[in-house]
Image (cartoon, helix red, strand yellow):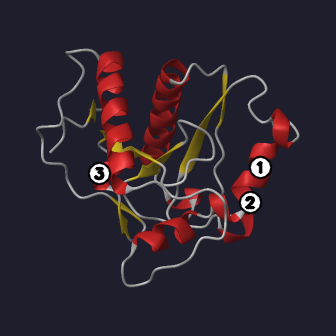
């Protein structure tokens, strides 16, 4: 399995998250999966991992795609714990609309957690309330980026700009390169 952080000099292949171009937010990819920063992170370091192939349900993936997706989740999770000094991770996957999936493209959330990070909202399980509210609705957040269909977000959290997400992706790309070492794959084009 070939994997890489995305090199700054390599011209990346356009990456779609459902219908949304997320190429500038991608900081790591394998032959079958990619990781990208979140437009509206619920906690610092909240990222997503998705398969390249756009399918709505986990059961739509091949066994090889499923294995690659979760190996990528493990690798990115280790990176996030190190970079964000986290002691734990939440790794939710909402599999289908009725489970709260807001974008019909399989995706796994990875949220770095720290002791007492959500005590002010009732404790560690408050993350699930955040995922269920509009700030966890990725479809709504990505629609806001579309100039033809602006929507007003009534939540107090504002989506991040493309530039801010690109900067975080570059930082994570460089950190992932440290983890992978000099002989671990080459940047994908």
Q: In this view, does 122 lie to the left or right of 145?
A: right
Q: In this view, does 51 lie above or below 57?
A: above
**Upstream in sequence: badge 3 or badge 2:** 3
Which residue does the numbered mark 2 point to in the structure image?
132
In the displayed image of the protein, which residue is found farthest to the front?
156
131 or 62, which is in the foreground? 131
Q: Residues within 10 Å of mark 2 (few under 14, many from 20)?
A: some
Q: Please tell me whether residue 178 is drawn above or below residue 142 in the rendered image.
A: above
Place residue 172 in its image quadrant: top left
**Position of residue 144 measured from the top left corner of the image (x, y, whole percent):** 47, 72
Q: Disc 1 marks which residue?
A: 128
**Residue ID at (39%, 47%):** 165
Please state the horizontal and vertical placement of residue 156, each as a whole percent of the image: 66, 59
Q: Is mark 1 on a helix, strand or loop?
A: helix
Occupied quadrant, residue 126:
top right
Residue 86, visible in the rendered structure? yes
* 84 w.r.t. 182: above or below: below
Marks 2,1: beta carbons within 8 A: yes
Quadrant of the image containing the N terminus: top left
Task: Evaluate if marks 3 and 2 touch, with contact meaning CB atoms under 8 Å apart.
Answer: no
How many numbered marks appear?
Answer: 3
**Residue under label 3:** 24
Instruction: Find residue 125 and report its horizontal and vertical position in percent.
Output: 82, 41
Could you classify mark 3 by the number of other residues whose Cα lies within 10 Å: few (under 14), some (14-19), or many (20 or more)?
A: many
Element under disc 2: helix
From the viewer's perspective, tell me whether residue 113 is left or right of residue 164: right
């Amino acid at each position: 399995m070939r994997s890489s952080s995305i090199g700054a000099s390599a011209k990346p292949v356009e990456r779609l998250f459902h219908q949304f171009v997320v190429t500038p937010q991608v900081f790591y990819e394998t032959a079958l999966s990619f990781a990208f920063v979140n437009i509206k992170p619920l906690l610092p370091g909240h990222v997503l991992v998705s398969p390249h192939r756009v399918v709505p349900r986990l059961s739509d993936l091949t066994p090889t795609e499923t294995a690659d997706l979760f190996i990528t989740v493990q690798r990115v999770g280790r990176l996030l714990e190190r970079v964000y000094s986290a002691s734990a991770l939440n790794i939710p996957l909402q599999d289908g609309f009725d489970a709260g999936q807001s974008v019909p493209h399989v995706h796994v959330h990875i949220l770095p957690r720290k002791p007492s990070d959500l005590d002010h909202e009732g404790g560690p399980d408050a993350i699930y309330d955040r995922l269920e509210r509009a700030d966890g609705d990725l479809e709504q957040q990505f629609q806001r980026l579309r100039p033809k269909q602006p929507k007003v977000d009534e939540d107090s959290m504002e989506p991040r700009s493309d530039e801010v997400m690109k900067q975080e992706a570059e930082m994570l790309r460089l950190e992932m390169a440290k983890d992978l070492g000099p002989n671990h794959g080459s940047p994908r084009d």
